[in-house]
Image (cartoon, rainbow, N blue to C red):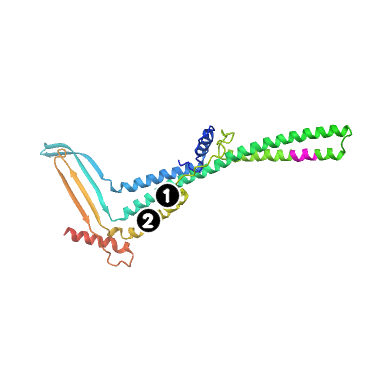
């Protein structure tokens, strides 16, 4: 997906391959990212469904015609027939549903990108924190060794009568304090590892800082971050969807244009093509609920057109 938050211009000998491998591992294990990707597939299916409003409907049937007169077969035929029809205009409501689905799909694409970036930022924080905490623990352990060696030297000099007891006590306190710092560093490492494990990642390949010093991050050239564009397209989808009830109220009175093509029999020896157009008609009283007057008004219109 999009990897521009921590993309780095690599112009040095240090390779960031383990780092990007860890990022990909975090993304593959992210349940929230997988959920957003599944939502994206669902929005694509919804958009495809809206686009199928304009696809034709094809019906093919096999028939047998058999006629008898005084127990004598005078006609015995097998033939196929086909009926192809599609709607060219469906009152305008389908167009709004398609536009809403298109905006929703775009919003979900950006949501996937945004979630991918969120996972990368969280993963990068854990990876870099792990490197820092391991180095901190190593340094604290080294300090502890130095403090213990210093205590041994001070104790030897005290037994030789060269320094007072206060110096030994001070060295012992320093060792105790350093042991506490080393223990805190160890706990910090374990806490960070528990957070990594909570992301379903068992091991990190990035053991050292993956980039050379003074390497500047390439933050990309996008004018808007995905989270901002996601909110925009989500608002657009909601705005268009809010028009659907308004259009559906007038849907029975909107214009409809249908085309139908029939072919058969012998087989398909002849065909007939016809267009049917239902013009837009206002209800008798727009101020009242349309479900009471709508079907009756439409039947009256169809009767007048047929006559």
Query: Would residue 303 be found to the left or right of residue 288 on screen?
Result: left
Query: Would residue 37 be found to the left or right of residue 157 on screen?
Result: left
SS state under label 1: helix
Disc 2 and disc 1: Cα gap in Å?
13 Å
- Depth check, mark 2 against mark 1: the one in front is 1
Q: Quadrant of the C terminus?
A: bottom left
Q: Is residue 120 visible?
A: yes
Q: Earlier in the sequence, mark 2 or mark 1?
A: 1
| Residue designated by label 2 | 240
Name the spot of residue 282 as percent of width and height, x first.
27, 64
Dominant SS in magenta? helix
Give the residues in magenta: 172-178
Q: Nearer the viewer, residue 278 or 236?
A: 236
Query: Would residue 102 be found to the left or right of residue 202 on screen?
Result: left
Q: Quadrant of the N terminus?
A: top left
Name the spot of residue 294 as percent of width and height, x first.
29, 62
Give the residue displayed 70% in from the left and 37% down from the top.
Answer: 140
Of the numbered discs in the image, which one, if any, rests on residue 199?
Answer: none
Circle 2 residues within 10 Å: few <14, some 14–19, many ≥20: some
Q: Nearer the viewer, residue 282 or 237?
A: 237
Quarter of the image for residue 167 reads top right
| Residue designated by label 1 | 107
SS state under label 2: helix
Give the residue displayed 66% in from the left and 38% down from the top.
Answer: 136
Question: Residue lying furthest right in this view?
Answer: 161
From what the image shows, is residue 207 above or below residue 216?
Answer: above
Give the residue displayed 77% in from the left and 34% down from the top.
Answer: 148
From what the image shows, is residue 39 above or below residue 249?
Answer: above
Q: Nearer the viewer, residue 9 or 143?
A: 9
């Amino acid at each position: 997906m999009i990897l521009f938050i921590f993309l780095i211009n690599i112009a040095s000998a240090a390779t960031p391959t383990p780092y990007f491998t860890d990022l990909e591992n975090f993304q593959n294990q992210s349940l929230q990212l997988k959920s957003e990707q599944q939502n994206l597939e669902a929005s694509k299916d919804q958009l495809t469904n809206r686009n199928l409003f304009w696809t034709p409907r094809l019906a093919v049937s096999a028939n047998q015609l058999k006629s008898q007169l005084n127990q004598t077969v005078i006609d015995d035929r097998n033939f196929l027939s086909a009926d192809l029809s599609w709607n060219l205009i469906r009152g305008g409501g389908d167009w709004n549903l398609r536009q809403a689905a298109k905006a929703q799909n775009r919003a979900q694409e950006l949501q996937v990108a945004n979630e991918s970036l969120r996972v990368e930022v969280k993963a990068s924080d854990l990876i870099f924190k792990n490197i820092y905490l391991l180095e901190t623990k190593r340094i604290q352990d080294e300090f502890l060794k130095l403090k213990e060696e210093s205590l041994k030297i001070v104790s030897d000099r005290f037994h030789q009568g060269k320094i007072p007891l206060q110096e030994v006590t001070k060295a012992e306190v320093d060792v105790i304090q350093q042991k506490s710092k080393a223990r805190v560093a160890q706990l910090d490492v374990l806490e960070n590892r528990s957070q990594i494990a909570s992301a379903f990642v068992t091991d990190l390949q990035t053991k050292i800082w993956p980039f050379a010093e003074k390497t500047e991050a390439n933050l990309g050239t996008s004018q808007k971050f995905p989270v901002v564009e996601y909110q925009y397209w989500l608002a657009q989808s909601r705005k268009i969807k809010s028009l659907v009830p308004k259009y559906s109220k007038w849907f029975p009175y909107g214009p409809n244009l249908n085309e139908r093509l029939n072919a058969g029999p012998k087989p398909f020896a002849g065909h007939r093509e016809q267009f049917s157009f239902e013009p837009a008609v206002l209800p008798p009283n727009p101020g009242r609920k349309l479900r009471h007057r709508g079907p009756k008004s439409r039947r009256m219109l169809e009767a007048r057109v047929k006559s």
